[in-house]
Image (tube, grey):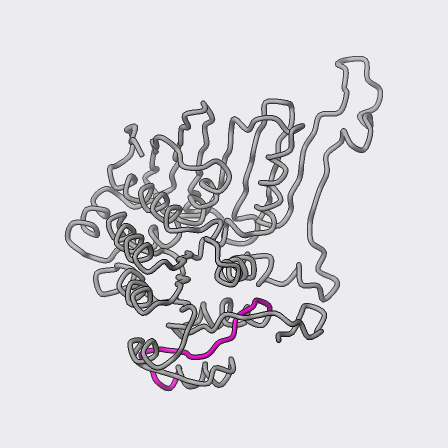
Amino acid sequence: MRIGFKSDLVDEAEIRAGFIGCGSHSFRNLYPTFQFAPVNLIAVCDLDGRKAEAFATKFSAKSAYTNHHEMLDNENLDAVFICAGYDNRGNPLYPPLSIDCLRAGCHVWMEKPPAASCEEIVLMQTAAEAAGKNVAVGMKKMFFPANEKAKGLMAREDFGTPHLVTLQYPQYVPTVEEFSRYMQRGEPNAVVGFLDHLCHPVSLLIYLLGMPESLSYERSNHGAGLATFRYASGTIASIILTKGSSMNGGMERTLIVSDRGHHITVENNTRVTLHRTPPLGYGDVPSFYTGMTDQASAVWEPEVSLGQLYNKGLFLLGYYNEINEFARSILEERPVRKATLEHAWQATRIFEAFAEGPGRQITL
């Protein structure tokens, strides 16, 4: 029995979950999502015992731990959520933690970035297959309602075939020397931030078009960059990494161009527009306002005047969708549909490719 969206009681099962990590991101965006998804938080774990106790009290978990092995041994959990940081070499902590949870018989959801190398992703895949458990990664861009709407519009027969996609994201591109110091010598630097954030536009690219065949990129002296991706179908895509741009409003933009005179834009992850070309002549048209309503452009944008679920950050930013998908995959005994370890491997492979440097064609 759980509380539904309309505060009604719903006779629906919930997963019994533990949580490793009591940081600011999880406090703002992950723990609060459990009130809407079929998740029953049983236990919380953090190296700081006072925080673990405080989070357990605030989010109604019955137990708090400072050792995740004790939590796994003592609690009968279906799944574990992990939101951790990095070790002293700047590597994500998820691979060893997730493998411990999988070996204990738990499904795993982990925040991004899941690993610093494809090799570590393979280790997690092997552990998941051996345990027969689901693993999902917090690739929230795959779950943004705006991006899901854009994906649905792309699939319409009248839209045609997308042949050009561009993504804009504010991100610094490290130098080859910075990549070398991080990946070869284990020295944390700007590459850690690149690993942390590149998966946002890359996971969106994978969601919209799948894994590209190759990558080439150029980098400005200031650290902005332009990456071009090629697909076997002939489609091309670019990610514009706009280091130095304003971080106030309109930081991100997606453009999807078809072969039938249509294109889709997603502005700032909220405003989706399907642009269509109504019948227009040239030189002899006295009014632009031609065409029927099904021939003109259409716009979708959430309003923020009412206390709706759709205009809350937990929903607009995909947190509810990703956690709900993970929980329901367990309850329905099926694989997760997106943000899988395979998607994580693809995103990490693209990260690794950037280390090869600009000005060359890199096979993915």
Instruction: Let me know if residue 49 is in the magenta part.
Output: yes
The quarter holding residue 53 reads: bottom left
**Badge count:** 0
The quarter holding residue 238 reads: top left
Camera-side residue of 102 and 353: 102
Q: Position of residue 8 (x, y in %)?
A: 71, 73
Range of the magenta residues? 36-51
Question: Residue at (57%, 70%) from the top-left corner?
Answer: 13
Relative to 275, say whether 30 is above or below: below
Q: Position of residue 99 (x, y in %)?
A: 29, 63
Residue furthest top as drawn: 283
Question: Residue at (34%, 31%) from the top-left corner?
Answer: 216
Question: Residue at (57%, 49%) from the top-left corner?
Answer: 269
Question: Residue at (50%, 50%) from the top-left corner?
Answer: 141
Instruction: Let me know if residue 27 is in the magenta part.
Output: no
Which quadrant is home to the N terminus? bottom right
Camera-side residue of 202 and 11: 11
Residue furthest right as drawn: 286
Left or right: where does residue 158 sit relative to residue 118? right
Relative to 182, say whether 219 is above or below: above
Which quadrant is home to the C terminus? top left
Camera-side residue of 231 and 107: 107
Q: Position of residue 154 (x, y in %)?
A: 60, 35
Relative to 194, say whether 358 is above or below: above
Relative to 357, say whether 128 is above or below: below
Q: Position of residue 352 (x, y in %)?
A: 28, 43
